[in-house]
Amino acid sequence: MRTILEYLISPHCSFEVLHLRKYAEQAFEQLNAIEKIVEDPEALDLIKELMATMHALGSAMTEHEKDIEYSQRDLELDESTDNAIREHMAKLANLRHAENNSLKEEALAWYEKNRDRFTSKDAAAIEITTIVPVKFKTARNWLKGL
């Protein structure tokens, strides 16, 4: 992601629409801030801001697709850069879903201790919804394959 943003804010980028550059610069600044405080709880708020900015950038780029000319060759993404981007995005996803993953771990630990009380996973899922704040379908999906 950093490589793409660096390209979009560089003077070498071929797009001419100024408000696109504004979104790219804002996303780049937010990405830098996130990297400085990855362990900080404020990271989730910054990630939400970054995702909103990236969404706005993507929307603006889609609207002006004909005005934007870049190619994979221009970006010069090699395999190591691509892997670094994927790893970074995976870390951001883990941060974003940390609360949900914690709820799932709690629910599954409870289910393992109490599974003999239930005649079906549906019944267990109903009970899980009283323990953690999730919908029945989510709780039931967590129990699949156990």
Image (spheres, grey):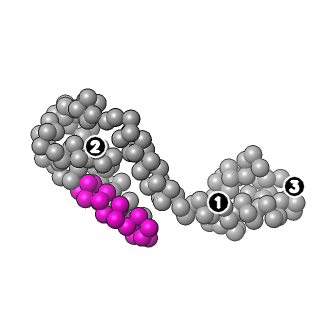
Cα separation, mark 1 vs mark 2, equals: 34 Å
Marks 3 and 2, how far apart in space?
A: 52 Å
Task: Answer with mark 1 or mark 2, whichever residue precedes in sequence.
Answer: 2
Q: Main secondary structure of the magenta part?
A: helix
What residue is pinned by disc 2?
Answer: 4
- Residue sticking out furthest to the bottom: 41
Element type where label 3 sits in the image: loop
Residue displayed at 55% across by 64% down: 99
Residue 64 horizontal side relative to residue 49, left or right: left
Q: Does 40 appear in magenta?
A: yes
Looking at the image, tell me whether mark 3 or mark 2 is earlier in sequence order.
2
Give neighbour class at mark 2: few <14, some 14-19, many 20+ (Cα, 10 Å).
some
Q: Reading the chain from its start, which is encountered first: label 3 or label 1?
A: 1
The three-letter amino acid code for the residue at tag 3 is Thr
Query: Which residue corresponds to mark 3?
Result: 119
- Give SS at disc 1: helix
Residue behind mark 1: 104
Residue 117 in view: yes
Magenta segment range?
A: 26-43
Q: Which image quarter: residue 79?
A: top left
Residue 61 image offset from top left, x and y in percent: 24, 40
What number is the disc on residue 41? none
- In the rendered structure, which amino acid carries the disc numbered 1? Lys
The residue shown at (83%, 59%) is 115
Q: Mark 3 to mark 1: distance in Å?
A: 21 Å
